[in-house]
Image: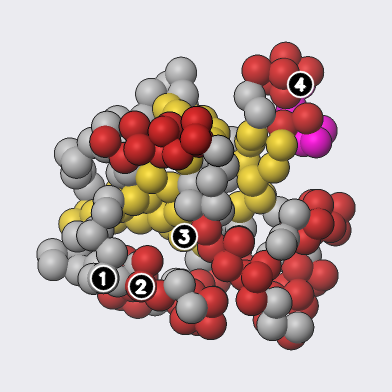
């Protein structure tokens, strides 16, 4: 646990504040999300979770939000959608949101093709990569580098599932052994079951 805290401190201390791309003058994450017109479900989820202060002016620490758009939430497996919005599982909702927020500001300018180590607010350490575009494994960024006062937003077209690499069958054996954590789109009932089994 001490090692994890040390890594988080180091990652925050080495944050790059060089912003490129779309800049929302004097806006914070919640305001910027409202302006896109494409994140109403995410905004409602944030408000329902009780985590709103992480996304507004109360939070000054720079971070990166991978923001699933409305289409992304509509593509969730029914079991997950029901858990979040019908059963109102607040613990699962909070965990899901924290998996989408990362320490520091990650833009196309400062993410290396070889991978940049980062940690999300759920405490999972993983690498993000930039190939032809900035991405976290197989997620596609639909709008990148929306810069705000408290960080940067990337709009994504699916809801992220952060998982142990050994359980991600889409990875080859070498990658599973090299990286302990990966992220992909939540698409199957099996992934929903795996996610929910980790909710405490």
Do the residues bearing badges 2 and 3 touch, measured as CB atoms within 8 Å?
no
Q: Is residue 137 above or below residue 185?
A: above
Q: In 3D space, how far apart are the residues under numbered discs 4 and 3 (Cα atoms)?
A: 27 Å
Give the crowd class for mark 3: few <14, some 14-19, many >=20 residues within 10 Å: many
Q: Position of residue 92 (x, y in %)?
A: 67, 67
Label 1 residue SS: loop
State the scheme by which the image is colored.
secondary structure
Q: Which residues are magenta?
A: 167-172
Q: Position of residue 102 (x, y in %)?
A: 43, 47
In the image: residue 99, left or right of residue 7: right
Do the residues bearing badges 4 and 3 touch, measured as CB atoms within 8 Å?
no
Question: To which residue does mark 2 refer?
Answer: 53
The mark found on residue 172 in the picture is 4
Q: Indicate the quadrant where residue 97 lies.
A: bottom right
Q: Nearer the viewer, mark 2 or mark 3?
A: 2
Q: In 3D space, how far apart are the residues under numbered discs 3 and 1 (Cα atoms)?
A: 19 Å
Q: Position of residue 128 (x, y in %)?
A: 49, 33
Which part of the image, by quadrant, shows the N terminus? top right
Task: Say which residue appears at 71% left-offset and 54% top-offset.
Answer: 186
Label 3 residue SS: strand
Q: Nearer the viewer, mark 3 or mark 1?
A: 1
Question: To which residue does mark 1 refer?
Answer: 58
Residue at the far left in the pictured view: 25
Task: Say which residue appears at 37% left-offset and 50% top-offset.
Answer: 64
Q: Nearer the viewer, mark 4 or mark 2?
A: 2
Give the crowd class for mark 2: few <14, some 14-19, many >=20 residues within 10 Å: few
Do the residues bearing badges 1 and 2 touch, measured as CB atoms within 8 Å?
yes
Looking at marks 1 and 4 on the same chain, the residue that comes earlier in the sequence is marked by 1
Q: In 3D space, how far apart are the residues under numbered discs 4 and 2 (Cα atoms)?
A: 39 Å
């Amino acid at each position: 646990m001490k090692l994890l805290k040390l890594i988080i401190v180091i990652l925050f201390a080495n944050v790059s504040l060089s912003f490129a791309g779309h800049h929302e003058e004097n806006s914070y994450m919640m305001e910027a999300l409202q302006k896109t017109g494409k994140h109403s479900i995410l905004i409602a989820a944030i408000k329902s979770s009780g985590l709103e202060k992480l996304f507004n002016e109360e939070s000054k620490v720079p971070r990166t939000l991978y923001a699933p758009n409305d289409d992304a939430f509509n593509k969730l497996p029914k079991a997950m959608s029901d858990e979040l919005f019908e059963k109102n599982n607040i613990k699962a909702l909070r965990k899901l949101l924290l998996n989408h927020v990362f320490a520091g500001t990650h833009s196309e300018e400062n993410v290396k093709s070889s991978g940049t180590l980062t940690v999300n607010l759920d405490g999972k350490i993983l690498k993000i990569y930039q190939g032809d575009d900035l991405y976290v494994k197989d997620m596609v960024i639909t709008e990148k580098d929306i810069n705000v006062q408290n960080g940067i937003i990337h709009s994504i077209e699916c809801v992220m599932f952060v998982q142990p690499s050994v359980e991600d069958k889409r990875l080859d054996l070498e990658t599973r052994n090299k990286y302990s954590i990966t992220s992909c789109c939540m698409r199957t009932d099996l992934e929903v079951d795996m996610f929910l089994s980790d909710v405490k």
